[in-house]
Amino acid sequence: MDLTWSPSEQQFRAEVRAWLAANVPPEPLPSGDTKAGFALHLEWERKLFDARWAVVSWPEESGGRGASLWEWLIFEEEYYRAGAPQRVTQNGIFLLAPTIFEFGTPAQQDRYLPTMASGEESWCQGWSEPDAGSDLAGIRSTATRDPSAGGWRLNGQKTWTTRGAFCTHLFGLFRTDPSAERHRGLTYFLVPLDTPGVTVRGFGRLDGDEGFAEVFFEDALVTDDLVLGGVDQGWSVAMATTGSERGLTLRSPGRFLATAERLVALARERGADAIDGSVRGRVAQAYIDAEAYQLQTLQTVTRVTAGDPPGAESSLTKVFWSELDVSLHETALDLLGAEAELESAWMKGYEFALSGPIYAGTNEIQRNVIAERVLGLPRK
Amino acid sequence: MDLTWSPSEQQFRAEVRAWLAANVPPEPLPSGDTKAGFALHLEWERKLFDARWAVVSWPEESGGRGASLWEWLIFEEEYYRAGAPQRVTQNGIFLLAPTIFEFGTPAQQDRYLPTMASGEESWCQGWSEPDAGSDLAGIRSTATRDPSAGGWRLNGQKTWTTRGAFCTHLFGLFRTDPSAERHRGLTYFLVPLDTPGVTVRGFGRLDGDEGFAEVFFEDALVTDDLVLGGVDQGWSVAMATTGSERGLTLRSPGRFLATAERLVALARERGADAIDGSVRGRVAQAYIDAEAYQLQTLQTVTRVTAGDPPGAESSLTKVFWSELDVSLHETALDLLGAEAELESAWMKGYEFALSGPIYAGTNEIQRNVIAERVLGLPRK
Amino acid sequence: MEFAFTGDQLAFRDAVRDLLAKECPPSVVRAAWTNADGRSGDGRSGGGAWLALGAMGVLGALVPESANGLGLTELDVVLLAEETGRAALPEPFVEHVFVGAPLVFADHPGVVTGELTVTAGDPLIPWAGSADVLVRLDPDPAVALGRGAKLDLLTSVDGSRRLARLIDATDARPLTRAELSLAFWRGNLGYSAQLLGLARQMLDLTVAYTVDRKQFGAPIGSFQAIKHQLANVRIGIEFAAPLVYRAAHSLAVGDSGAAVHVSMAKAQAAGVATNAARTALQCHGAIGYSYEYDLHLWMKRAWALASTWGDAAWHRERVARAILDVTNETGEQK
Amino acid sequence: MEFAFTGDQLAFRDAVRDLLAKECPPSVVRAAWTNADGRSGDGRSGGGAWLALGAMGVLGALVPESANGLGLTELDVVLLAEETGRAALPEPFVEHVFVGAPLVFADHPGVVTGELTVTAGDPLIPWAGSADVLVRLDPDPAVALGRGAKLDLLTSVDGSRRLARLIDATDARPLTRAELSLAFWRGNLGYSAQLLGLARQMLDLTVAYTVDRKQFGAPIGSFQAIKHQLANVRIGIEFAAPLVYRAAHSLAVGDSGAAVHVSMAKAQAAGVATNAARTALQCHGAIGYSYEYDLHLWMKRAWALASTWGDAAWHRERVARAILDVTNETGEQK
């Protein structure tokens, strides 16, 4: 066990920190879940990209630095500590990109990765449908082969698509084999949102920002080269991304450590003695949990680096970070007392945190996965 | 709304309190879940009976005082406040007696109620079986008609029978119609434990006392007059007792108010300032919950007195009191700190409290009942 | 001993419930978020619901009959507050009926009918901008005129609660210690009842949704994970309500433990309502997270009321002090 | 950066696990409850498991090689403590290996091989009656001889933990402040690891039972209510273990935050183990409540270790002090 960073890793951290100190906007940007805010966030993404901080773990030729998982962790730690803007491109970078790296043709990789890294093209996820939320196998949107047009006709509706109203592209699952059941017969498509026959309607999330969208498809034609990873292979291709959605990539410990630090700062500022004893205990517990999450991540990265990828264990992680995030914010609001109801970064953060136990597979689903795949309890 | 006691109720309370003050043993009796302790508790029961405090709510002719539910609540409050001995006869008095009052023949009522009230005969409940715990419909013990012998032959095994090793009689469910499914074809029998063919083996509960028993039946002959409420009617007859088991009768608020008072006394004695802030909050919460339980009971008794019996709501009560009892004791043990592991009334009480969420229908079953019968959520 | 409401009290509640069902459907609550004054209508005199409540005499319920009020007690109006919570009524109901009107009716008789609106805050005053009379419990407890008062406007997570700090008051008169104390405990009783109503509504809404919503080929309400979460909310409500009703009774009869009883009620009701909100959202999933769906209107009201005028931890600590520290807590003082 | 144990450390753990599987099955734990000394054998020198651990050198693991110990660090033995927790080993393992031996080996070389047993308490000393050397952390931190020591015997809920207060000590020598501090944090590390092992064992036992046990025509482990409770225990273990291992590392390398890290570990491990106990019992139902079934042997050990040497609330408060009050907490002192 070695819990120290190598000289080169420390050097990397210093570089990241220095750049962020010099470039992070002094004033927080307006919410990236609004049209105006999204545009400003894209400018920031461009800035990150130009300095090659947008996708540190990607190979150099795709705009990254070929950074190790360790360096990626360091980058994230510094990024959150610096209070840098939310990554509005994250769904592309963290959910789609790994899939393109794994299943994409060289042509697809060249075509989509650089523009994704630079924010020139922004991606939203088109999975959920009105009748397919937790149960993705209930997907009804179809893609029908149209030989004459040399492509596929998309029909149906996606919903709860994060930032769909602002993105240029959507990656999603469509049923290509209507006779197939549940998870079979789905295909993974890359869809430009300006395709004729595609209509997007943004709608508000809990905090009122237009962070959700419904996307309607009416005979929208997409060409064959927009199929990712093979016709009718959509489910197994998609699972690669849920893996990364649930696993490490989206939930770097830096995010929760930074929140925990802010919580502690808030508690000190309210005056440690003025704090109710039970809330004081919860501040300590939340801080302990944030450290536990970081340490467990170090353990996982060590394993992954040694070539042992996480499986169903990622469900343990998802439940823990999502509930930790809620309790970090809940505790902060309790520290604010009567002022808790006022507009604040804590309240906004709390509203956002409440989505954690719901998306990327509700925590109820995750607990089933843990029980069945980690503990081996019977399905029926 | 009137939250005051009438003069006659106050008079009743004064009488109870005076008698208990004069008669409750200064030293707590040894555990009633041991052979020796059980005998001493029966002496106490006799004393209660002679003073007509054993079954206050029963009619005078059966040894009671025809007390109202309100007076019964008062009696219980005083009984627990005085730290009087546990009622080792409770399973008969609270679970069987209501059934005998409702379904018993006059002969059965005359035969069994007075001796039950005096403790001359003591009753244990024979429901659970090795394969029928939460799922009572899984009962396999049989009663087969034996015309020649003019009665029924009992075969099978009961288990987790509280104080079965010390009682003289058992009331239990046996399958009289082997062809019937689940809840049908069961019959409610009253069984003297000295019946030839009945073997009782006591075994330890969590605290080590011999409070459980297995009861084995091998062609044990019971006469027809030992059937309570009709052949094959056992389930509906038994439900009357689960009602009272889960409902009011066993869980008078006095029990938890007394525990809450002792918890507060313990906290004061440890020094209010010495207490960890989070534990201090839990003491207050437990106290609040104990009062909430009392007030909810007053509400229920008001309703019952007005002729509106509680239905599935009794499941709400069961979950609440059983978890309240656990947290009252858990909080007390946390106040004791390093001394928590030492033999003490609190630790013994905690071990007992832990059975609350399990027996009389686990709290998981109760939550199903609440969801389906109180909230109307679909069974499947 | 009788722990139940009278037929009159229940009939009064039913009348108000019917009134709110008609005058304050979710659409009205939603509209209030964008109204000029955040209220159920859009004039200073409030909207349909407010006017109707005034016509019914409810707004002056705690004002003595000698001053044309209904001369009722906290016990008579606690169920009405619960109903306004259930409807998420976007009006200063508790602030006016429980706190303000009984304090200012002599100088401002218009509050009895609702012709004038009074609101109150400690320290944040909801709907201050559209009120005629303002009561500030903290700092410097005082009654002031709405017109000409200098307000520092603030934004609540509940878009209908237009908050303000009263910075500079016109014609302010200080509150006596007794007035302050009664106002504080009555207000907390009102909020406790509203929190209870909010919890009931969020539970009903969620039960209805989970019975309907199918995933994995079954109504999600048939899954134990959903059933048990909702059962816990129902249990919480079952054992919070009697504390709220008892607190109302204690204030009505002047029980010396009234203040502690109110703290017990507020601590419990705040916990139940916030848990109901959390559970309702989780059981709804993404749709509950949508601004277009009504759930958030109730959730945010619950968050606001749970933390205002002392949150659960604060009131629990009041109880702790009463049972652990003070030997004979009269509970008469804030 | 590498958060993992070495092959040697894992092999050492496996060896001890195998040893305990052979020498300390549940029957041995159960027998200890009725043995004269509450230990895995019945002589003062302990039982098979204790002798075997001694033969393996484990009992002197933290004693310098110069004194014939293994000269290992906390990081090398933390997994061994976890295994002794999993086996509910009825021996003063933590007290001897983590606390006592490194303190007294110079005066009492016999502790290195296990020929002599040392135990320790703060203030309650487990297995004091059968030990040769006693370490008392509180009051008056001191090392004393078992023979001739005046003991006040007490009964623990864990029948194998024969507790005593050391009232009057023979040839006592006081502990230095540094000795006391190191002993306290090492002991808490050992208990944290044992609590982790206890939690793992209770979870495994319960998973096995719920897969087997059928009610309502299905294995009860197939019901969501059971699944989710057990999943929560598994999550708790997942995020307690790294804190325990980190604390071991911090003590091993002399990290200035070591004390706080141990408090984090103890707070988390105590919480996880008590929750595992509660869940295991609930998921077992009546059989888990039976004295004849083994579960209670683990539950009661967990209760005892969770509250000894500072319970979760106490250690959480230590953390609170470090992050909220003290500006540069060195964590070096108890």
Image: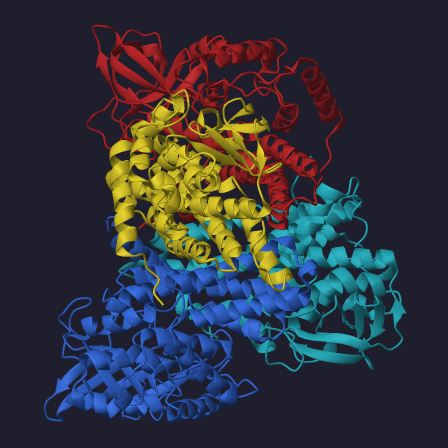
Chain colours: A red, B blue, C yellow, D cyan
Left or right: where B113 falls relative to D147: left
Name the quadrant containing residue D20: bottom right
Q: Quadrant of the C terminus of chain D?
A: bottom right
Q: Does any portion of residue B129 appear in the rendered image?
A: no
Left or right: where A39 falls relative to C32: right
Position of residue B249 relative to residue A172, above or below, is below
Nearest to the observer: residue D74 or residue B86 = B86
Q: Does any portion of residue C19 appear in the rendered image?
A: yes
Nearest to the observer: residue A14 or residue A182 = A14
Q: Position of residue D249 (x, y in %)?
A: 72, 46
Q: Residue at x 43, y 9 (%)?
A: A107
Nearest to the observer: residue A236 or residue B94 = B94
Q: Position of residue A224 (x, y in %)?
A: 31, 11
Name the quadrant containing residue D183: bottom right
**Residue farthest front in this picture:** C66
Numbered disc total: 0
Q: Position of residue A302 (x, y in %)?
A: 62, 36
Q: Quadrant of the N terminus of chain D?
A: top right
Name the quadrant containing residue B116: bottom left
Left or right: where C76 falls relative to A71: left
Left or right: where B148 falls relative to A283: left
Position of residue B53 relative to residue C64, above or below, is below
Q: Position of residue A360 (x, y in %)?
A: 42, 32
